[in-house]
Amino acid sequence: MTASSAKADLDRQRVLDRLSTRRIGRALTVLDETDSTNDDARAAFIRGAPSGLVIVADHQRQGRGSRGRVWQSPAGTDLYVSIADRPMLSPAVLPTLTLAVGLALADTLDGFVQAPERIAIKWPNDLWIDRKKCCGILVEAVATGAQIEGVVIGIGLNVNRQAWPDELRGQATSLAQATGQAFNRSEVLASLLQHVEARIDQLVAKGPSAIVAQINPRLAMRGERVRCDDVAGVLTGVAPNGALCIETASGPVEVIAGTLLPDTTCDDA
Ligand code: BTN
């Protein structure tokens, strides 16, 4: 990793000036470039970094997405953020941590798009604006044997990007594309950290049901025909354990992992 001067609109002090969190972002490193902020946060965590450590980079050389995908991370436009935390959560509740972070990102986007009906949480780890992906979440456990020591929460948020490679064109968007205005990344980052801390604290204090109750009204494709790997039917919501609920021809099914897609096999030709 390269220690930072960072780009003009990604400024450590400007983020700190806007933060009123108790732990998340109190230790904050801003890098010009690195391979993956999730790897850096994990390494720092293992060396004993404080809970709430945040590492953000202007550019990632090997950004990682879920399911082994690449997270394209060009310089100068977007946010690549990793948060190392030790929330007091049992392993059984960990899947709902991704949903809590998703809700925090919906809160963040609400503040900049100011049209909550355009923003949806696409289970389990994406945020949509106008049905296009604007943000992805990659939560990774830091474990010693069977013992979970903590988590690294990776967030990629498209802020000012205007152009996309062929494979993302028509499927991805940014805050700037969605609103027609550019945003200061320090301000977006400060808002994001504020909301992530609040939603993690809510999950720890009140449990998953409080989070899930707020996810369901904002769930992408709710009431629509979907397919999640080999399960097809109507998406009815998220269960308190974080599983996806699909009403299939043979009854309700809960799915705990998979790739959720609109089911176009039943569309009229
Ligand atoms: C997804 O596939 O939707 C999750 C994408 C997560 C990308 C972020 S960018 C910051 C952090 N560092 C990484 O290498 N990945 C995550």
Image (tube, rainbow, N blue to C red):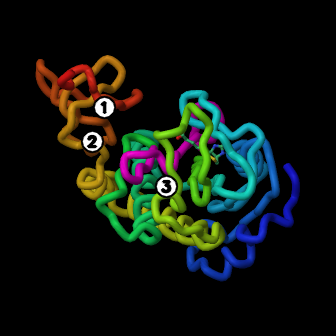
Q: Amino acid at mark 1?
A: Pro
The crowding category of the residue bearing disc 1, from other C-alpha atoms within 10 Å (few below 14, some 14 to 19, many at least 20), is some
Q: Identify which amino acid the numbered label 2 is placed on.
A: Met
Measured in 3D between alpha carbons, the distance from the residue under mark 3 to the one under mark 2, in whole angstroms, is: 32 Å
Asked whether the viewer can see residue 20, the reply is yes
Image coordinates of residue 166 in percent, x first then y, are 58, 33
Quadrant of the image occupied by residue 64: top right
Q: What residue would you read off at disc 2?
A: 221
Give the number of the mark in front: 3 or 2.
2
- For ligand 1, the image quadrant comes to top right
Sequence order check: which comes first, mark 3 or mark 1? 3
Give the SS element for disc 1: strand
Q: Residue furthest front?
A: 269
Highlighted range, magenta: 126-148
Q: Which mark is drawn over residue 262?
A: 1
Marks 3/2 in contact by CB < 8 Å: the verdict is: no
Choose the circle earlier in sequence order: 2 or 1: 2
Q: Residues within 10 Å of mark 2 (few under 14, many from 20)?
A: many
| Residue at x 12% of width, y 24% of height | 251
Q: From the image, tell me which residue sits under label 3.
A: 88
Q: The disc labelled 3 sits on which kind of residue?
A: Met
Confirm whether the magenta stretch covers residue 154: no
Write the residue at 70% across / 78% down: 14
Classify mark 3: helix, strand or loop: loop
Q: Is residue 129 magenta?
A: yes
Residue drawn at the location 31% of the way across and 17% of the way down = 230
Q: Does the closest atom of ligand 1 sit within 8 Å of the Cβ of label 2?
A: no
Question: Is the residue under label 1 in contact with that under label 2 (CB below 8 Å)?
Answer: yes
- Residue 2: x and y in percent read 87, 53
| Residue 252: quarter of image | top left
